[in-house]
Amino acid sequence: MCGIAGFFQTKHDVFKDYSFNLLKNRLINMKNSIKHRGPNDDDIFMRGFAGFCHTRLSIRDIKGGHQPMTRKYNGDIATIVYNGELYNAEELKSRLMAYDIDLRTTSDTEIILYCYLVFGTKIFKDFNGIFAFAIYDNNKLIVARDHAGVKPLFYYTDEKQFIFASEIKAIFEYGITPELDNNSWCEIIALGPAHTLGNGVFKGIKEVLPGHFLSIKTDYDKNIIIEDCCFWSLKSYPHTENYEETVSHCNYLINDSIKRQMVSDIPICTFLSGGLDSSLVSAIVSENLGEKKLNTFSFDFVDNDINFKSNSFQSTRDKPFVDIMNRHINSNHTYLMCDNIEQINCLFKAVDARDMPCMADVESSMLYFCNLVSKSCKVTLTGECADEIFGGYPWFHRQDLLYKDNFPWSYDMSARCSLFKDEFINELNLEEYNYDAYKTSINQCPLLDDENEKDVYRRKISWLNIRWFMMTLLNRMDRCSMYSGLEARVPFADYRILEYIFNVPWEYKCHNNQTKSLLVECGKTHLPPEILYRKKSPYPKTYDPNYEKLLSDMLLEEYSDNSRLQDIIDYKKLTTFISSSKDYGKPWYGQLMAGPQMLAYILQIGYWLKKYHL
């Protein structure tokens, strides 16, 4: 994995204009701001009216994969910066061989660049991988993002310039000033930690949509012209296979995706929670390693064995099931633990990584764990995205949530607004913003003409999960892992799995009332029964009451010292909230973010406002 950033502007030819050093220094600053994404190598490129920078985490072709990379074909010269992994590189390489291509490296970067030079942008749909890249070609810029949106790509544009980066911070290093408007606050309060696809939260910051590429050119007046092109999207079509055929097809796709994503020139590991998803990934990886022992990692919190409280969302701890899987696949397992201080310290590092408030301690703890994993391994496979795709969450099964005319994981605005000043909240129209985001998304869902009402709701809930909830978790995984130079791969987010399972009938996804029955069927030859039929339990969080006390004390101290936080938070509401008991079982986002996480989220907002002088 890597970090990419750059610019395309119409005012200065970088080698002919006095501004060469200015633009070069901007590129260097952009590169340095995302160095954590690629600690092994870096470089910059400048030509014509464009500049690129790249930071590299060396995973494949360690010696030959240096970027930015320039290649020539039929007189056309193009340069690429690329962040990602291409899992069908060998098939694409075979296609290129018919065009007398002389590959100098074994890197997938070179394959992507030559594919573009030979086939043009139409080849993007055939890329199987996770990627964000930019190609400068004859005074034209192409930026693209993978089908599912696993890899991030943000941009800012006006009439004379287009600036892009893997992370928003690099755009600011170019010289764009961080600003907020009412829509920014609506994203943070009404939708956060999710955000609308395409919306970078900061004023003027956007993101390339998943499965899209942008073609950036100039007109006769040297104004920036952007064409937004979709090369892949989820589509609805009738499912014609019976249950047994569906299981077989699903089993092939899952095994093929996991095996493809094992490609690496350095050792790989897996995250293992003892749940169905991560256990299936770990088992298949282990089976395909041959005699090599798989390194696996699990996460928990200090004293959770004492403080854990079972609730409707999280009924069991992970460790007993991790132990079962560890014995089953005979992995080299490491139990990682996080305490209160480490988790709180990482709250602010998580904002640094995401450039905005995020999933509070759910994110800060993941960042901490990824940092520990990165010290011994640089590539990991995870079980992320399975619940969104295969129907694992409560809102797929509970009728009250399935038919909820809003986001089922964050429909209650009261908890979200509870600590803010009334006059601040009243200006934002949060409920309207939230509902508009929901309806806009629902109206984009592709439907079949003959679907009954319940099937329509099932399809819409799947669509919402993939477009919203899954994206939030993918953003978390990317920023948390890449902050420490760890590459996290997500086999279940293979676009072939997405488009196939999206069209599988619900009675197959929940066959005989078995949650995620297709995954259970696929796991029968890989997993023990205790894992196959374990009730879903989400990512762990701390249940230590001292954590809440630490958060409360820190937030009160931060409030007294942060004038910007004082402008938006009501002190009386805050102190009342702190003195009242928190319900750990009724989250305001997802399954984990309840009372203590609201305190942590406000702490993150305060830090964010100061960091960016907002």
Image (spheres, rainbow, N blue to C red):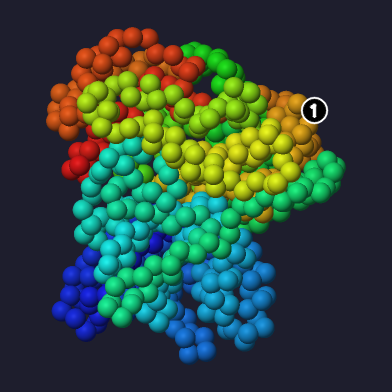
Q: Nearer the viewer, residue 434 or 398?
A: 434
Q: Nearer the viewer, residue 244 or 199?
A: 199
- Amino acid type, mark 1: Asn
Image location of residue 299, percent across then percent down: 51, 31
Q: Report the residue that reaches farthest toward the front.
A: 449
Is any part of residue 423 visible from this angle?
yes
Asked if 437 appears above or below 421 in the picture, the reply is: below
Q: Nearer the viewer, residue 62 or 356?
A: 356
Is any part of residue 473 visible from this angle?
no
- Residue visible at 32% across and 70% down? 224
Q: Answer with left or right where residue 82 lies relative to residue 608.
A: right
Q: Answer with left or right where residue 448 lies relative to residue 358.
A: right
- Residue visible at 42% across and 78% down? 137
Q: Quadrant of residue 583?
A: top left
- Residue visible at 22% across and 26% down? 423
Q: Nearer the viewer, residue 330 or 481?
A: 481
Residue at image mark 1:
512
Total labels drawn:
1
Image location of residue 535, percent across then percent down: 66, 24
Asked if 354 appears above or below 34 in the picture, the reply is: above
Asked if 582 appears above or below 103 in the picture, the reply is: above
Disc 1 residue crowd, few under 14, some 14–19, many 20+, Cα 10 Å: few
Image location of residue 481, percent across then percent down: 45, 46
Image location of residue 605, percent across then percent down: 28, 34
Q: Quadrant of residue 513?
A: top right
Callout 1: SS: helix
Q: Report the residue that reaches farthest toward the top.
A: 580
